[in-house]
Amino acid sequence: MLAALVGAALGVAGTLMQALTRNPLADPGLLGVNAGAAVAIVAAIAFLGVDNVTGYLGFGLAGASVAGGAVYLLGGVRQGFDPVRVVLAGAAVTALLLALTQIITLNSDEAVFDQFRHWAVGSLQGRDPGVLLPVTVLITSGLVLALLLASALDAVALGEDLGRALGVRPNVVWLLSAFAIVLLAGTATAAAGPITFIGLSAPHMARALVGLDHRWVIAYSAMLGALMVLAADVLGRVILPPDEIAAGIMTALLGGWFFVVLVRRYRIVRL
């Protein structure tokens, strides 16, 4: 259940990020979500002694929210949305937060490093069942918000001027979409650790199947993302029993090759 929720959240967050930036290589990490969650969790482990997934969820989501807000402010979105400016701000914030994460990790004892390492590989193993309810509520809320924004994203994709002519306020769409991305990707990353590739590939596969209508792209991205994380989790459990390969490692190992085949053999819909 947790794997499906995490995959759906990452797939939809990637769809929203690619739609906002009009960049087919965008993923939720461009908003600094992964780096924000990482620095908050490693700080909570090192300084507050947090050692359970429930604690990771709270601190990770808070860190992701702060990082997303920083990108929003540094990107100058109040002056008008510019995808390039937002991507550059996201890269700067991510680099800073990753540096802070490394500083804390390298200056902490071995126990802190071991705890953080277990989260950082993107493992679903041993997750507390008590974390399932808050994760379900948060991710479901983000998915509903994303679906409500689908028509507005279609209008914005036509250009800001035409979008305004259709009654859409691009800055409001950006703000609500960024909130949905932080809610979805922040919750997923805090609960399971950083799982790569899903936010990048699921939207591409969805668009190859259903075209550019965001109502369908969002729905299919959620389903495909859930299937990919479930498959990675199952494969990681059966390949080297009784040991387990983390889902985040499996997606990185297999996802890149699969995406190369998809690009070379099938059509990739332009944004």
Image (spheres, grey):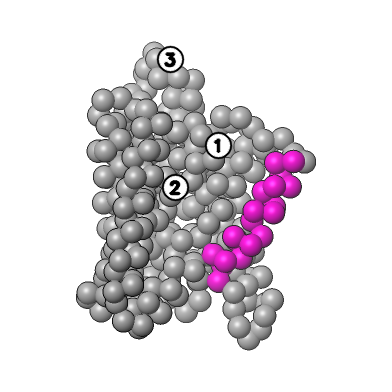
Amino acid of disc 2: Pro
Q: Which residues are magenta?
A: 246-264
Task: Provide residue 191's location: percent of width, then percent of height.
Answer: 41, 66
Q: Quadrant of the C terminus?
A: top right
- The circle on residue 28 is 2
Q: Tag 1, which secondary structure?
A: loop
Q: Residue at x 45, y 30 (%)?
A: 153
Task: Provide residue 67's location: percent of width, then percent of height.
Answer: 30, 50
Q: Which residue is mark 1?
A: 24
In front here: 259 or 238?
259
Is residue 144 something that shows in the picture?
Answer: no
Determine the main secondary structure of the stretch shown in magenta: helix
- The circle on residue 162 is 3
Magenta stretch: includes residue 111: no
Q: Look at the picture and state if 64 lies above or below 72.
A: below
Mark 2 and mark 3: Cα distance apart in space: 26 Å
